[in-house]
Image (spheres, rainbow, N blue to C red):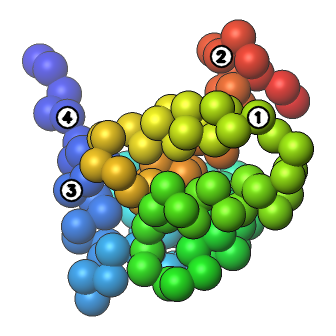
Amino acid sequence: MRKKPGPSPLEVFEVCDEDNKGCLSRDDFKVAGVLLFGYKPSKVYYLKIFNYTTETRQIFTAFDVQSRGFLTFEDFKKTFNSVSPKLSKRIVPEAFRQVDQDSNGRISFKDFESAMKYGQDEGSPLYFA
């Protein structure tokens, strides 16, 4: 007899995001872990994920100076110009296109986080530990 599949990550997120903020608190995240995995992962595992996401959010917030929840090309260009003023003018538009995964002209936190994680999974040819 086949085992019934558990809830999808999206279903778990929707259940745990009780106040519909679009994000999970630390405690909500712990409950989501139990619902997804069927056991409570270690504190070290949670801290690693939570700290990475918090740092990424802080960086994104620093770029999102107008607090809109997304980055426009102008936001992106200003940030690059302040960090690396001698960068080739062709690189910034190309980088923006690469990070803007859904090509809507905006970089959401999801797009930004994905770009920040690029090369960090063990299957990636750019993996670094």
How far apart in space, not on screen, are marks 4 and 1 (Cα)?
Answer: 50 Å
Q: Which residue is mark 1?
A: 88
Give the residue type that dot 4 points to: Pro
x, y percent for residue 83? 85, 57
Residue lying farthest bottom? 19
x, y percent for residue 41? 60, 53
- The answer to which of 78 and 64 lies nearer the viewer is 78
Q: Which mark is residue 124?
A: 2
For mark 4, does the 10 Å Cα neighbourhood hold few (<14), some (14 to 19), or many (20 or more) residues?
Answer: few
Residue 78 lies in what quarter of the image? Answer: bottom right
Mark 3 vs 1: CB contact within 8 A: no
Q: Is residue 59 above or below residue 129?
A: below
Mark with earlier residue (4, 3): 4
Q: Give the foreground label among 3 and 2.
A: 2
Give the residue drawn at x 71%, y 62%: 79
Q: Which residue is mark 3?
A: 11
Q: Which residue is mark 4?
A: 5
Q: Is residue 57 left or right of residue 108?
A: right
Mark with earlier residue (3, 2): 3
Give the residue type that dot 2 points to: Ser
